[in-house]
Image (cartoon, coloured by chain):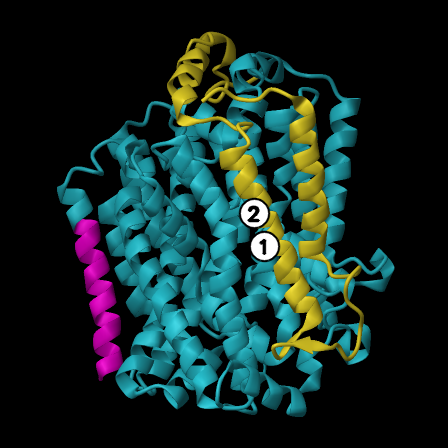
Chain colours: A yellow, B cyan
Amino acid sequence: MKRTNNPWTSRIFILAFLVLTFFCWCPILYASYGPADRIWGVPIWAVLAAAFGTALFALEWIYLFAARITIGDDELDDIVSQLAQVNTDESDSAGEDD
Amino acid sequence: MFAIAIIAGICLTSVAVGYLAMRKGFTRSADDYFVAGSSLGYFVLIFSMLASFLSAFCMFGMSSLGYRTGFGALFVLTVNLIPLGYLWYFMHRKTLLLGRARKWISMGAPFGERYGNEMRALVPLVVLVASIPYLAAQIQGIGVMIEAMSEGKVPYKLGLFFVPAFIALYLMMGGMKGAAWINTFQGVFFTVMVFVLFFAVMAKNGGFRPTMDMVFEKHPELFQLGTKGGKLWSYPMIFGFSAAMCLGCVCFPQPYMHAYSSRTVKGFKAMTLAFGGLCLVIIAMPTMIGIAATEIVGGLSKVEADKVYGLVASATLPDTIAALAVAGGFAAAMTTVNSVVFGNATNVANDLYKLLRPKAQAKELIGFARACVVAIMAVCVILVWNPTTPVAELSVIAFGTAAITIFPLWGAYYWRRATRIGAIAATLVGFGANAAFLVAGIIRGENMVLSPQPFLLNLNGFLASFIAAGIVFVGVSLMTKLGPVEKKSLALFFHPALEE
């Protein structure tokens, strides 16, 4: 499967990821201190947090599997063999002192 | 008696699986022992990764946190972990690809190749020290649960010896492959049992909504944010917990080990995506079990509240099923202990020991890693001999400390200008600041790592340390020049084949 190389597609995904991550990490924009209304016995802010989390999960699924942006198994061997051809003397520093 | 039989059954089955992995020849070479020969399929990867993080913290700690603090606990280990789907992919895509090409088997390897030997040794050391409270929390949870399940027949301190000994045994025999199989088996088991307990607890009072209505009438504060004068579940506190846990997950040894062990890219991506989604569902259950338990088991506080999961199981299920439900939590703790101990033992052997003895052969490295497994277990048992801090708080401190290594990791993969000095300075500053807040908190009698501090603009100690580490990393890297190691590494870490 050939990958899409439009950088704007990735940027839009990343922007959406960052916004939804903020909602998943802090309810400041959709909650308030003190008593809260409830849905199905659960505070509304908790339901909204779960909804934002679900939306982020769906977006991540599209990004990883459906948008043809990320690497796939058909490329793995080729990428690994290209990386393996990098001159190890030039890059093998893990066992050396600098 | 039945409870003790279940515990013994889980331990013996795990040892048998470890033995089977050894007999099948999955521990012959270093590659086989440490990263399962990069052979794990996506089902094993997903459940092994899930089980390696879902722990005593998830079952006992989260039910305790829900019981003590209410719905705000949902931001500790459920919805806040959904971003891992893309964060793990961004941060560990190159770990997978470069690890496969360069045959990496430890988490110090990328830091060593990118920044040199100091970082190759420093990062595993920081993560090892950060892991200790987390491991201690699991072993503490195991001891508490064994005592509760056996109704005191197996005292807490005996339980501390009993289970870690079994874990050490099967890790030494089975290596990564054995650990992954055991994680998968136990992961499926505890997932099923947490659902069973959730439905039993809710059914006790006529269903989910009636149960929550009853809790709301008596404990409305559990449904609120900013209680206790704005201190409990304030926005800075929620953000601090959420970020510490999520970013800590990126930096613990498990994602490195599972990236190296993954057979396919699809499996790796499925693992990164599924983790957050499964956490959202599975960990919300013990959190809400804890909240509902306020109507069933009252009067527990602090460390005592860690027993609520077992107590509520006894109160709502027949004895045999209750024992199985609690054994699910016990299995969760075991899987985390084995994964974190194994990851750290791998790092110590391949990053620290190998630096001291560069010519060490596979057999010597595996032997040293096995000795590390025992040593790490022993240290944790000593630390929790007299438990004083609840499981949940211990775990968040550990994740927050590990999270500061995210900057050198990001710089290694995505910032050409990152320097060795910048990486070392950021790691030392972040770790040192976390340690300073921890010690100062102990002296002042409050948890400064987790609680927002007015003098830090209401950030908690973790976030302040994290931000400081980031500023130092960028600032020092810009002020220093690339050394020969960093220059050499660019050809590999920024190879065109890695571009997306």
Residue at disc 1, secondary structure: helix
Left or right: residue B316 versus residue B128 is left
Evaluate whether residue B350 shows in this view: no
Which residue is at 71% across, 54% downward? A23
Residue at disc 2, secondary structure: helix
Where B436 falls versus B296 (above or below)? above
Q: Quadrant of the N terminus of chain B?
A: bottom left
Give residue B266's position: percent from left, percent from top. 41, 34
Left or right: residue A51 versus residue B370 is right
Q: Quadrant of the C terminus of chain B?
A: top right
Q: From the viewer's side, name the closer residue of B4 and B79.
A: B79
User: What residue does disc 2 label?
Assistant: A58
The magenta-colored residue range is B1-19
Whether residue B100 appears in magenta in the rendering, the answer is no
Identity, as a three-letter code, of the amino acid under mark 1: Thr
Give residue B88's position: percent from left, percent from top. 54, 40
Evaluate whether residue B349 shows in this view: yes
